[in-house]
Image (cartoon, rainbow, N blue to C red):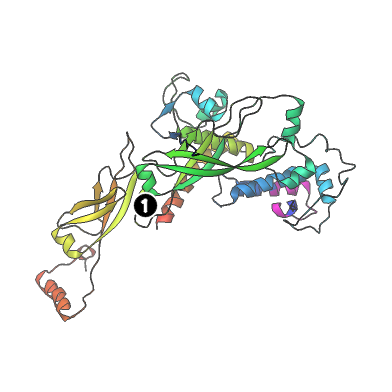
Amino acid sequence: MTEQIVYIQGVVLNEETRCTLTDLCRLCGVTAELIHDMIEEGILSPEGHSPQEWRFTLIAIKRVQTAVRLQHDLRINLPGCALALELLEELEELRRLSQRS
Amino acid sequence: MEYKDYYQILGITRDATQDQIKQAYRKVARKYHPDVSKERDAEAQFKNAGEAYEVLKDPEKRAAYDKFGANWRDGQDFEPPPNWDAGFEFRGAGYAGEDATGFSDFFESLFGHGHSDRQRQHVFKMKGEDQHAKIIISLADAYSGAKQTLTLTRPAVDDSGHVRTTPHRLHVVIPQGITEGQRIRLEGQGLPGYGGSPPGDLFLEIAFQEDRLFHAEKRDIHLTLPITPWEAALGAALTVPTLGGNVQVKIPPGSQSGKKLRLKGKGLSTGSQRGDQIITLYIVVPEPKNEEQRNLYATMAEKMPFNPRSELGT
């Protein structure tokens, strides 16, 4: 008996695809208030002027998830998360560059 | 079951104060947090530290744990003596922390497990947890897309309410033109939900295998192409490897080392985004192996007066 293998097609979280505030909340399992606060801290910068018009890139999912974990695990407040995220991204870039040389 | 030395995990002595325990935990947690650390076993270390702190921060649990004495070594085979927890109050209520999944058998056998108790008492509904994993793929697979079978370990609660890790096989499509660090979300492939709620999602992060020839920078694929001085000077049509197979490339006359040529669309392209292959020329000067070849260089020196250091003023 041969078993049919089903390959799952996922969604690539890229910069081109946009999602709404509702989508983002559902995808990350967080409240709209938290997203508001993250926008205020500059952790997220959606396109659009009002919450209804906000469009986030799917890259935002990672930032939200990382920020939530940092908040929860290391008790970092949101301004701290914003700083940590920036430094982590810079560090990643530097690590990538130093691998080359 | 292996004994866990919670003091050693946090790098403190057995007479550490509660404040010292807190500080040590915070320090280890920051160091090994999976979002921060790039160490291979960061996640395991982070979980170990969380487990250690869960016990040592609670004076009751700490006192119970301390009863085993200081002679145990981390990893040593261990069975708790019968009635070891007599006189301590936490047993029965079980561990009721936020996230007990992933704690060790050692922890569970001593302090119980919150989820299973809670589940029996009242039916509660909760979406399953999201899972995160990293997969390493070759540049060739990223270029043309691929199908992969992966095995992830995931904690699962068995019939008796114990948490066991079970392998979870998954067949996934790697879409064409995926780039390093990009993530794929597989809906409903995370941990199962509770009380009929939907499972969580699985997030796969893409990392690239080191390649002998190529390296990727975002969507572009870089290749260093060695050429001879006469190919550089006179121009040439050369066969160059790309991730999609060999192609013919024209080297323009008068090319210098470091010159970059762009092969459009030969990088990590998707339906809507284009990646290129960037070729960096690298002139290799052949060593003269005999008198005749040395004379060729001498003739060039004589017939082609040239000072590459004129800008240095020497």
Q: Position of residue A55 (x, y in %)?
A: 43, 25
The residue beneath circle 1 is B215
Q: Is A44 on the left or on the right of B275, as rendered?
A: right
Residue B131 is a magenta residue: no
* Amino acid type of the residue that numbered disc 1 sits on in the rendered structure: His
Residue drawn at (38%, 44%) of the image: B142
For label 1, the SS is strand
The quadrant in which residue B61 appears is: top right
The subunit carrying tag 1 is: B
Horizontal and vertical percent position of residue B40: 56, 52
Q: Is residue B148 left or right of residue B35?
A: left
Question: Would you say B221 lies left or right of B137 here?
Answer: left
In the figure, residue B296 lies in which quadrant? Answer: bottom left
| Crowd tier of the residue under label 1, counting other residues whose Cα lies within 10 Å: few below 14, some 14–19, many 20 or above | some
Range covered by the magenta-colored residues: B8-24
x then y, percent, for residue B193? 62, 29
Q: Quadrant of residue A84?
A: top right
Q: Which residue is drawn at 60% across and 47% down?
A: B43
Residue B161, position in %: x, y?
A: 73, 36
